[in-house]
Image (spheres, coloured by chain):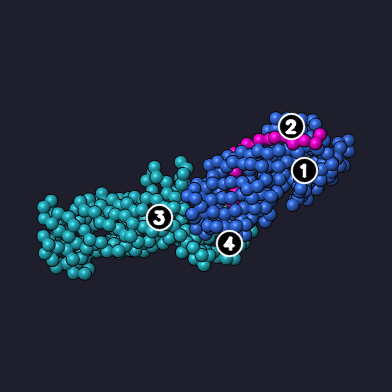
Amino acid sequence: MFKKTMLVGAAASAMVLCAPAMAQAAPPYTVSVGGSSATADHSFTASSVGAITFTVPLDTMTCTSADASGKVHSGTGMSGAYTPPSPPWNNPATISGSTWTGCSEQFGTPLQVTQNGDWQLEVDDPSVTSAQTDVVQGDITHIDAHVQDMIGGAVCDFEVTGSANASFDEAKQQLDVNETGDGSLIVSAVTQNCLGFVSVGDVATFKGTYNISVPDGAVNIS
Amino acid sequence: MTALLTRRTVRAGMAAAAALAAIAVTSGPASAAELDITYDASGSTDVATTGSTIALGPTTLATSLDSTTGAFTGTMELPAAHTDFDAAGFIPMSADVTFEEVGQVSGSLSADPAGGGSDVSATAEYDIRLSDIKVVGFPTFTGSRCRTKEPVTITIANPPDQPFAVFSGGRLTGSYSIGDFANCGLNTWLVNALVPGGGNTIALDLSNPRTS
């Protein structure tokens, strides 16, 4: 599920050489909220910054905005991966709900997007530090989204599942989803193929940035 | 609709390559493919000079849509129709009218900037053929080659406040002019005195989209 780039690896190496005083944190990870790493769940809400885009080879879909909610799991000794049964949690957050507004395909046809099940935020970034400045690399996994037209799915009705590259900017408290289409996110089921625009197996992309708000305080992953 | 009906005229290799390119680079533009989509179509046209209404269809509009650009071509054959009107306001006349398709319908589809659907426009050319012209119920000699000298160009689009719905259909409207007729035998002068002119309107309802 995890995706690392060579660039990240190189950057991590450079940081090791150049900033030996900064504490490095490979797994296990510590997730703290508001300065506390005590094992607990903390509610969060998320609001998109700008539009959300989602593409398959023959169609581009956008939503003008999206909101999400769920729990941040603080704790220590976490592997970063979702390891059911949970709790105990080994990944930093669970997205349990989302709403998608103003969604349409490239020719303007309104679409309805709904989240199925819980989505998980996993992290795999050996370069993270205890500083509140990391951009922590990871993935949103267990994505399952149902997309249909606004006439009850009569013509367009399909499901997207898989995972998406994501990063969490600790300074901005922003989650950036940037799945460029490596095949980890696909159209897994098609009930109505949107007049041929969508097929089972289509590789999907997913881009969006969300401001994360946690009433208990800022999130840090180290 | 079965998968077999979903004929993607995809230049398979090109589409695959394009898809890979899109994946490699960004989330950007979708790959290109020609999607064959058919709508049921029916409507009517009002001829201004005669004050008559002619039914159009029911028929089908079969289109081939470029999935990336929204450009499309298509065909829409129209069945013959019958019209009645009063010449000079009091002489009952009737005729059979056939719109004979000349070339393909061409058009474009794009997202309506106001949201809620698509903007679509299309242009088609038809020869209008008249036959079985009757005056006060009596047949006249018209022949079988009475038609417009030049094809009539009809441009239709969704009304500004009514976005078109690709996945369900919608209404398209437009206006057009009719030019002179030829080869109508002794009726040529009469036809050209009564029918040609501008301000003719058309309304077409598209529904039941499906792959073809």
Nearer to us of marks 3 and 1 is 1
- The quadrant of the rendering that contains the C terminus of chain A is top right
Instruction: Quote the CA–CA distance across marks 3 and 2.
Output: 52 Å
For the point 81% across and 34% down, the residue is A38
For the point 53% across and 42% down, the residue is A102
Q: Nearer the viewer, residue A100 or A178?
A: A100
Looking at the picture, which amino acid does disc 1 mark? Pro
For the point 41% across and 58% down, the residue is B39
Instruction: Quote the CA–CA distance across marks 3 and 1.
Output: 51 Å
The residue tagged 4 is B15
Looking at the picture, which amino acid does disc 3 mark? Ser
Q: Is residue B183 above or below residue A168?
A: below
**Helix, strand or loop for disc 1:** loop
Residue A15 seen by the camera = no
The residue tagged 2 is A218
Q: Which residues are magenta?
A: A37-55
Location of residue A154 in the rendering, given as x and y in whole percent from the top left corner: 49, 54
The residue tagged 1 is A87
**Helix, strand or loop for disc 3:** strand
